Amino acid sequence: MSSVNGVSSSSTRLSGLVSGMDTDAVIKQMMAAERAKVDKLQAKVQIDDWKIDAYREVTSALQSFYNTYFDSTSALNLKSENSFASFATSYKNTDSSNYVTLTGVSGAQAGKYSITELKMATSAVLTGSNASKDIEGAAINLTDLAGMSGADNSIFITVNGNANFISLPTDGSITSVSDLKTVLQQKINDTFGADKINVELNSTSDGIKFSAVRPTDTFSINTESPALSVLGLDSSSLSNKIDLDSNLTDMADSFNTALTTGSGNAIAFAINGVNFSFDASNTSIQDIMDEVNANTKANVTMKYDITKNSFTIKSNSTGATDKVTVSDTTGSLMATLGISGSDDGSDASVTLSDGTKIVRSTNSFTYDGITYNIKQDYTAGTDAVTGEVKEPIEATITADITKTYDYIKGFVDKYNELIEKFNSKLNEDKYRNYTPLTDDQKAEMTDEQIEKWEEKAKSGLLKNDSILSGILSDLRNTLYDTVEGAGISLSSIGITTSSDYTKNGKLEINEDKLKDALANKSEQIKRLFTKSSDITYYSLLDSPSGKDQRYKESGIAQRFSDIIQDAIRTSTDKDGRKGTLLEKAGITGDRSEYTNLLFKEMLGFEEAIDEMNERLDSKEDALYAKFTAMESALSKLNEQQSNLASLLGTGT
């Protein structure tokens, strides 16, 4: 809309030019009461947002407590009997633990354990023969050797990672292959050290053969060495070890036993009934080992021992029922590696002095509350060869009361920290005069003033909150409710609520009383905490009728676990509800982050704010339109007065 008589349209709102009135200030004052309603709604949005943060702080504390003491994978799992079965082990001879370790767990009986024999469980394993052949040349023509000159008369050798050129004598001094062998041996010894490589005559005594002195030594001759052909060497076999990364067809002549393939360079074999097939022209030994080792059904590990220059295929399991069976189905790869047939594993056994023999398929197992971890074979008695007398291995298992006490104390300390977190929220002072600041208010304050104000405004948001009060009450009741079959209570073993009211229900421990109970009532303490119900927690989500029965049949740990899960679980019950805290405020990363009650309430407030702002904008526009009309009318009136004055002036 164009300007009329110097009065601006409502789009620019340059008003008051005629009347001299501060239209913006007048309208702002007229709208103040209406805008205050928006500010109140925005304050409600901010309060809900702060409440979400406060609830999630409690949720996080509960989650941490649950993960530490009630998650089945936690080493401190309060529901596990092993958490209350702390034992110490000592050995008569200090080296006994080199052969076996004994660890007491739930059900262990303190006392002495004497072992006369240990047998380790073994895996089935097939071991191949020497995989690669020595570097052996064909017949040498000494005339060709004498005719060489310059750089052509050398070979490039690498020994254990060190490389150098070895020059061949071309001055005609070599009159026999035996002479050449002697000269080469000396040059290699001078360059790499003695006792690294043996230089010998080949099987027909008309050529040279190179071999490692020790199986741990690795050497190779570079395929680009100019004098290879003169020495009768084939460039396809110039290392004393297997090249794991070369294609099988390229290294076929390197094997000690000839490699054959099927049609189209196919090779295939079976391990434990699992078939493997490859194209030898584009497959390396490393490729084959990787595929075999990744196959969980074959359940083996294929390895190359560079020291022994041989391959092994070993089962990933142990025990007498363990087996490895290997056979070629196309070509001869397994036979070439010297691997064929089958092998069985063996069981582990522990023989006690009373004649009891415990047999298991693994080297670590638990029997009658004792976990045995066998490390070496051992037989007590007199060695028939050396005459050495080996005594039975003696281990003494004793209850470690201090360790169990420390565990329970650690739980009590963490519980008290959790209680303190709840009480800090429930009893926090509320400052009713400190409401969320508006943007206009913040504009007039410093950052420090804003921070201090909002600290007061956030205080007491969960004061006397019914959800937190309910969770806290349930946890406290669990500490005092009877556990059927335990025969004891927390108070009877020295764990009581503090009589100091300022501690708001925190637990205290009578150390002497608890340690005495651990020494004399360990099984009852175990039941008090770890007793469990056959009714599962998650079955109650679909059918809650058994909840009271589960509570009745459970010990303290399972009851605690259920209460916390009722508050923070992400799974839903038959009505689609998650834990109470998640229903109220949600957690980050879960669907509840955007479906919780407070978030929905915030959305409702924001929708109301949007609708109210639209109405207020329309009302404000209408007010500006009225003032614009007034300015226009005043402008016309002034114009008429001016015209009248002009006419009157003219008439005189």
Image (cartoon, grey):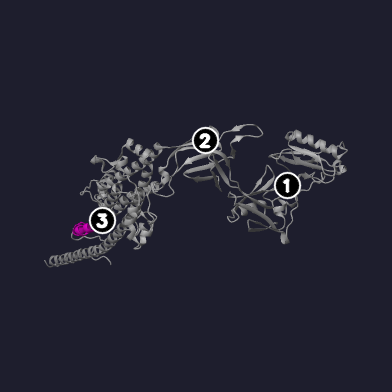
Pointer 2: residues within 10 angstroms few (<14), some, or many (20+)?
A: some
Residue at x-position 74% and y-position 54%: 259
- Taking the magenta stretch, the answer to whether it contains residue 27 is yes
Residue 326 to residue 84: above or below? below
Horizontal and vertical percent position of residue 575? 34, 63
- For the stretch drawn in magenta, the main secondary structure is helix
Judged left or right of residue 645, residue 588 is right
Q: Which quarter of the figure is the C terminus placed in?
A: bottom left
Under mark 1, the amino acid is Ser
Disc number for residue 132 = 1
Query: Residue 368 location in percent, x, y?
Result: 48, 45
Circle nearer the N terminus (1, 3): 3
Look at the numbered discs 3 and 2 and tell me whether their residues touch, using CB distance below 8 Å.
no
- Say what secondary structure mark 3 lies in: helix
* Circle nearer the viewer, 3 or 2: 2
Q: Secondary structure at mark 1?
A: loop
From the image, tell me which residue sits under label 2: 394
Which is nearer the eye, 136 or 146?
136
Q: Earlier in the sequence, mark 3 or mark 2?
A: 3
Residue 200's disc number: none
Q: Magenta part of the protein: which range? A: 22-37
**Nearer-N-terminus badge (1/2):** 1
**How many C-alpha atoms fall within 10 Å of the one at disc 1: few (<14), some, or many (≥20)?**
many
Looking at the image, can residue 367 be seen? yes
Q: Quadrant of the N terminus?
A: bottom left
Q: Residues within 10 Å of mark 3 (few under 14, many from 20)?
A: some
The circle on residue 44 is 3
- State whether residue 646 is above or below residue 170: below
Q: Residue at x 19, y 61 (%)?
A: 18
